Image: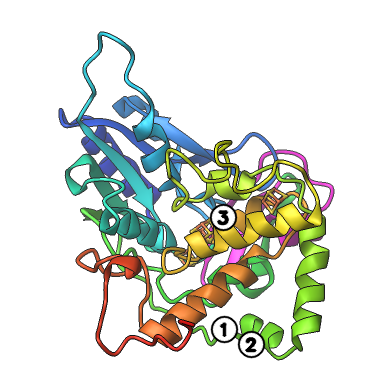
Amino acid sequence: MVNVDKLKEIARETISRDDVKYLIGWRQGTYGFRAAPYFMSTPEEAEELIFSPLCTNNLATYLTLAEKLPVPRGQEPDSRKVALLVKGCDSRAVVQQLVEQGISRERVLVIGCPCRGVIDQKKVEAKFPDVREAVSAVWDGDTVVFNLPGGSVAVPRQEVLAGKCLTCRYPNPVIADVTVWEEVAVWGSDDYVDVRELEAGSPQQRWGFWEEKFASCMRCYSCRNVCPMCYCEDCVLDRLNPQWIMRSVNTAENTAFHLARAFHLAGRCIECGECERVCPVDIPLMKLNRKLTKEVRDKYAYEPGVDPEAKPLQASYRPDDKEDFIL
Ligand code: SF4
Ligand code: SF4
Ligand code: SF4
């Protein structure tokens, strides 16, 4: 059972520590069914912290974003820890960032929040299309209860949870320095039905599917920017010399962008679904990411973001690794 008072108490204790510079969590958003990322640096600010089915953002993105900013001239880098609230899927991003040495273990303090699933905004907004005010929500057994302006409404979890949560195998954080309440029972399993459906089509059908999807991409790069695993300081997409991918927005260059990104994330994507969530034109990016995840799992028995002691896929080799793809 989620006890937000306990979470606030832990946050106050954490932010009072001399070796912690700030804590990243969630607070209620300003409209609709939204929570917002919340950076707090004083114990008093803990009062606004929430943990609820609205807390969709994977905050692990900030570990690599905020921590790679240039240090102003004349200032010393602040080497204190960043404290971070994580759900199960978010914690896999932290693990993978550690495995890749994108962050160092002594710089992060992980506060684990066992999770019962977050909402899919689109599903909820379709159910309650006229709600503009900020609405809070809580888990209650097999329902999510929304505190709407006219009163509370309980909706079965199955009807409002994000797709990733319906099949979640890691609702409990896989890494945590502090866990704020008891672990939840795992309810999900994943046999990649969505990927298998696509695989069943002919090459022409699959190409047609992706060609249509990629044609609508406007190259806003929200999917890249929100991704906790897209943290290269010098992204190949931004490079002008040599220019691997043209800036022009057309199906050919869009396809090059998506394939480059998907392959850069093979064996690294931790399936948090943030890229697909933020896409303004609803491109089903998780089908692409999960196709590569499935290939990596089947060929190399490798799953990213679950073992802090693991090596990155690209840096590990076993004599019996499949190599039949090498020409
Ligand atoms: S995927 Fe799992 S850990 Fe992540 S939000 Fe959904 S239920 Fe929670
Ligand atoms: S978020 Fe969507 S529209 Fe924007 S670059 Fe990514 S796929 Fe294209
Ligand atoms: S590619 Fe998408 S699902 Fe994978 S880690 Fe990045 S944001 Fe999450």
Residue sticking out furthest to the front = 327
Label 3 residue near ligand 3, CB within 8 Å: yes
Residue at 75% from the left image edge and 88% from the top image edge: 201
Element on which disc 3 rests: helix
Kindly indicate whether the residue at mark 2 contacts the one at mark 1 (C-beta within 8 angstroms): yes
Q: Position of residue 81 (x, y in %)?
A: 23, 36
Label 1 secondary element: loop
The amino acid type found where label 2 is placed reads: Arg
| In the image, the residue with mark 1 has its CB under 8 Å from the nearest atom of ligand 3 | no
Residue plotted at (23% across, 63% down) = 308
| Residue identifier under label 3 | 274
Corner quadrant of residue 307: bottom left
Around disc 2, counting alpha carbons within 10 Å, would you say few (fewer than 14), some (14 to 19), or many (20 or more)? few
The magenta stretch spans residue 303 = no
The three-letter amino acid code for the residue at tag 1 is Tyr
With respect to residue 299, does 179 lie above or below?
Answer: above
Residue 298, how many percent across, how many down? 44, 87
Q: Kindly identify the residue that appears in the image at 28 percent across and 66 percent down.
A: 315
Asked whether the beta carbons under mark 2 and mark 3 sit within 8 Å of each other, the answer is no
Classify residue 242 by image quadrant: top right
Q: Disc 1 and disc 3: Cα gap in Å?
A: 18 Å
| Visible residue check, residue 226 | yes
> Disc 1 designates what residue?
192
Which residues fall within the magenta stretch? 119-148
Q: Indicate which disc residue 196 carries.
A: 2
Q: Is residue 48 visible?
A: no
Q: In the shown orientation, is residue 8 left or right of residue 198?
A: left
> Looking at the figure, which quarter contains the N terminus?
bottom left
Mark closer to the chain start, 1 or 3: 1
